[in-house]
Image (cartoon, rainbow, N blue to C red):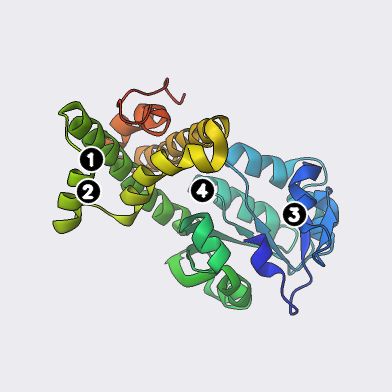
Amino acid sequence: MARRYLRPEFELTVHDNHAEALRPFEDTGARLTTSCADLVQSSQVIAVCVRDDVELLAVAYGDGSLSDSIEPGTTVIVHSTVRPQTVRDLGESLALRGGRLLDAAVTGGAHLAAAGELCAMVGGDAADLARVRPVLATCCRRIIHAGPLGAGMMLKAANNLVTMLQLVAAHEADALARAGGLDPVLLAEVMTENGNLTDTMRRFLEFRTTGPGSLGERGYREFQDRMGRLGAKDLQVALDIARDAGIELPGASAARPLMAGVFNADFGTGQGGSDAG
């Protein structure tokens, strides 16, 4: 997404606490910094992509943080998948200093990010969205205004719930076909014919074959472990929203502890790793 901002109409500053993450932007024309305060004070629009609520809170309230350094009129866009209440609380903190906040969760994966074809689910004030729409449009083909602050995260949580349940289904169907001595290609053919095989499922299953070759066995395992943990985290966000709303999500509750095994399964055996925690 940051690479998409390397355009003449933007003066891009890239920040990360880890200097090695900045190396791909050396000699690109972007300004690099390892200081959050420096980034905030030099930017009118700030896009935040971190892993979870804990990392967002560190960026928001730590030393030299967003809440300490925000300038009046600056808009912060949170792309991370986090709890709606986290962004609402942050929005209140930034407003005290004249800052604005949008939650703009995205879906589509790295390949669509590189092509500028993500889908953004935005929560927040419509006027704030109109002001930063040209920035979001650099990365996103579709921009959906979901409602007030936090609504983008709610929409993303519901979407991710579908994604993770799809992957559980794909993993178990693949394991069942192989255990019965079937060629999984036959299962893919049938699921394509009746519409069951979504693009998400297909890419997930294909990566089990291509991943070790493209990333190496160790890199593949590390990547899958990270994805399993992210899947468990995203399902927990959905479960937290459901708890606050007073409803139950038995499918999400059942799927969350399965995420590590779904992503870390030994190809063709249906066996997996431990609970994602």
Cα separation between marks 3 and 4: 24 Å
Cα separation between marks 2 and 1: 6 Å
Q: Name the residue at 38% across, 26% down.
A: 266
Residue 61 image-quadrant placement:
top right
Q: Which residue bears the numbered disc 4? A: 81
Secondary structure under the numbered disc 3 in the rendered image:
helix
Residue 86 seen by the camera: yes
Q: Which residue bears the numbered disc 2? A: 188
Q: Rate crowding at label 1 as few (under 14), some (14 to 19) or many (20 or more) other CA atoms within 10 Å.
A: some
Kind of residue at badge 2: Ala
**Comes first in the chain, label 4 or label 2:** 4
Q: Rate crowding at label 2 as few (under 14), some (14 to 19) or many (20 or more) other CA atoms within 10 Å.
A: some
**Comes first in the chain, label 3 or label 1:** 3
- Image quarter where the N terminus lies is bottom right
Point out residue 30 in the picture as x, y percentages from the top left corner: 80, 64
Residue 199 image-quadrant placement:
bottom left
Point out residue 37 in the picture as x, y percentages from the top left corner: 83, 52
Secondary structure under the numbered disc 1 in the rendered image:
helix
Question: Marks 3 and 1: CB-CB under 8 Å?
Answer: no
Cα separation between marks 3 and 1: 39 Å
Q: Name the residue at 50% across, 62% down.
A: 112
Q: Which residue bears the numbered disc 3? A: 24
Q: Which residue bears the numbered disc 1? A: 184
